[in-house]
Image (tube, grey):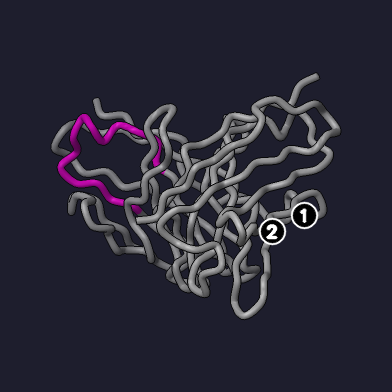
Amino acid sequence: QVQLQQSGPGLVKPSQTLSLTCAISGDSVSSNTAAWNWIRQSPSRGLEWLGRTYYRSKWDSDYAVSVQGRITITPDTSKNQFSLQLNSVTPEDTAVYYCSHSGYFVEYFKYWGQGSLVIVSS
Amino acid sequence: QSALTQPASVSGSPGQSITISCTGTSSDVGAHNYVSWYQQYPGKVPKLMIYDVSHRPSGVSNRFSGSKSGNTASLTISGLQAEDEADYHCASYTTSRTIMFGGGTKLTVL
């Protein structure tokens, strides 16, 4: 049973960087069969997959075209967690952000974090 | 990339069956059997209901079933119950190694 606990600020100013962390229990961020995702949800955009990081003999990541160039998802093996950084945010990045687990040939999301409302406003 | 297409809303009476469609392209829904469905109550975290087109996780009622034909996947709920009233979202893996979600469908039980 994987459990995910999110943390991070709920208010970010426009043009600044949104940062969230997801602590993992019940699995390892370095697992060769897991992938660690960030997903967001807003009334205007619905659920939107942002990207993921995973380890398959080396670290790799995949990102959505909509946020490519602004997003970085990084693992922290010492704390068994992973983080989201989204740069140059605008009010359109206001959403509930979720971390989630998927895996190798496991292209679905059974385990989710509790969700974090992030508001982009000055 | 555009989101998968779902109807904005569907409705049905208790005991009836409803089907929610999820239309994509040959680069997502039509390319793999990696289609999943999620149920979400207001203010709550999405819950996995169907994975790999038609598989149910342990604990999910067998009233929920999934299928796919070409570029369109479908979620069917039979024997509709009041507790089924929620938002439903489809998702698909794509040939670009990304995940695409649908816009979501609000199910109303009349």
Residue span colored magenta = B75-88
Q: Amino acid at mark 1?
A: Gln
Q: Quadrant of residue A12?
A: top right
The spot of residue A58 in percent (x, y) is: 66, 76
Residue toward you, A118 or B49? A118
Q: Residue at x 67, y 48 (%)?
A: A84
Residue B79 in magenta stretch:
yes
Residue toward you, B82 or A5? A5
Instruction: Write down the chain letter for disc 1.
Output: A
Q: On the rendered structure, is A65 left or right of A51?
A: right
Q: On the image, numbered disc 2 is attached to which residue?
A: A63
Q: On the image, numbered disc 1 is attached to which residue?
A: A68
Give me the disc on residue B56.
Answer: none
The spot of residue A57 in percent (x, y) is: 62, 80
Q: Amino acid at mark 2?
A: Tyr
Q: Residue at x 21, y 44 (%)?
A: B17
Q: Residues within 10 Å of mark 1 (few under 14, many from 20)?
A: few
Q: Earlier in the sequence, mark 1 or mark 2?
A: 2
